[in-house]
Amino acid sequence: MLPSVEEFPYAIRVVSEVVSSNGSTSQGSICGSTLAPMDAGVPIKAPVAGISCGLIQDDNGGFTTFIDIQGVEDFHGEMDFKVAGTKKGITAIQMDLKNDGLTMEIIKNALEITGDARIEILDQVMLPCIAAPRSEVSRYAPKMITMHIDPDRIREVIGKGGSVIQKIVADTGAKIDINDDGSIFIAAADATSGEAARKCINDIVFVPEVGKLYYGRVVRLMTFGAFIEIAPGKDGLCHISKLADRRIEKVEDACKVGDMMWVKFMEIDEKGRWNLSHRDAMKEIEEKKAKGEPIQ
C-alpha cells in the first residue's frame, strides 16, 4: 500500500506505542499505522484496517468464531486469527493456534467475518477521521522533490567542475543528487528551498514549445529586431517584421528595453537560434479573447 520511491522519496518510520490493552494490540497498531501516514501526507494507495478472530469448539465438532477478541478470550480460546487488509483484499494474515488444526469451514468463516468487520472499521471508524491522505506533507517535514531531465542536459546542470550545481546548492541550501538516467532528487529543509532549487534546474534545461505563447521581457534591441527573454537567461529574436501587425521603420517604434510582451515561439532554426513573433502572439490572443478562452 506504500507509494513508490519515485512518487514519495522518503524513508518512512512508524512507531506504535501501546500503554494499555485488552485485546489485539497488533491490529490496533495496523489501524493507527494507517491513519498516521495519511495524516502526515503519505500518499498510500488505500487505507488498511486489522481485526482479530477467536475460536471456541465443542466436543461434537461444532465451533463458534468471534471477532475483536479481548485478553481473556485470547487466553482461553483456541486461536487468534489476525487479518489485515483494505476494502478490496487482504494484505496480511498472522495466526496463533492452540489446537491441532483448522478445517476449511472454520477458515472460510473466519475470513468472512473478519472481512465484514474490516470494512466496518474502515467505514465507521477510520475514514470518518480522515478520508484520504493529506495533499502535502507537513510544512515542518523535510521536502523531497523528484524530477527528470534529458540525460544529455546533465552536464549543463552540473557545470564545469561542478560549478553550476554547487552554486545552486549554496544559493538554495538544498541537497541535490543526479542519476545517469536524468533523475534528480532534491532534499531541502523546507518547501521554499526545494522549489528554488527545482526552479534553478528547470531554468537551465528549459526548452520552449513550438507554437506556445510566452510572456517575456525585451532585453536587447538590434536594427533587425528585439531579443526577448522568455525564461531566466533564455532569449530569442523577434524580427522587426514580426514585432507589429504593420510595417515599422525601426525596432524602437514597437518596443524598448524592459518592456514586457507576449510572443509566440515559432521555431529553432538550423543554427539553434530561437525565433519569436509578437505579431502572431497578439493575433492568437485576440482569437482566444473572442472565444472566451484563457491565455496561456
Image: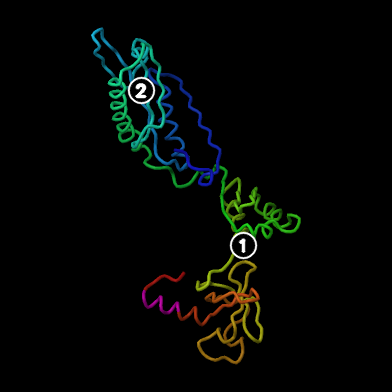
Horizontal and vertical percent position of residue 94: 41, 23
Whether label 1 touches label 2, CB < 8 Å: no
Residue drawn where x is 39% and y is 34% of the image: 48
Magenta stretch, overall SS:
helix
Span shown in magenta = 284-291
Residue type, mark 2 in image: Ser
Horizontal and vertical percent position of residue 159: 71, 58
- Residue 52's tag is 2
Horizontal and vertical percent position of residue 173: 66, 50
Structural crowding at the residue carrying mark 2, measured as other residues with C-alpha within 10 Å and reported as few (<14), some (14–19) or many (≥20):
many
Label 1 SS: helix
- Residue 205's tag is 1
Residue drawn where x is 63% and y is 69% of the image: 234
Horizontal and vertical percent position of residue 210: 53, 72
Structural crowding at the residue carrying mark 1, measured as other residues with C-alpha within 10 Å and reported as few (<14), some (14–19) or many (≥20):
some
Residue type, mark 1 in image: Val
Residue drawn where x is 54% and y is 91% of the image: 247
Vertical arrangement, residue 219 with respect to residue 187, above or below: below
Disc 1/disc 2 C-alpha distance (Å): 54 Å
Going by the image, does 233 lie left or right of 56?
Answer: right
Quadrant of the rendered image containing residue 230: bottom right
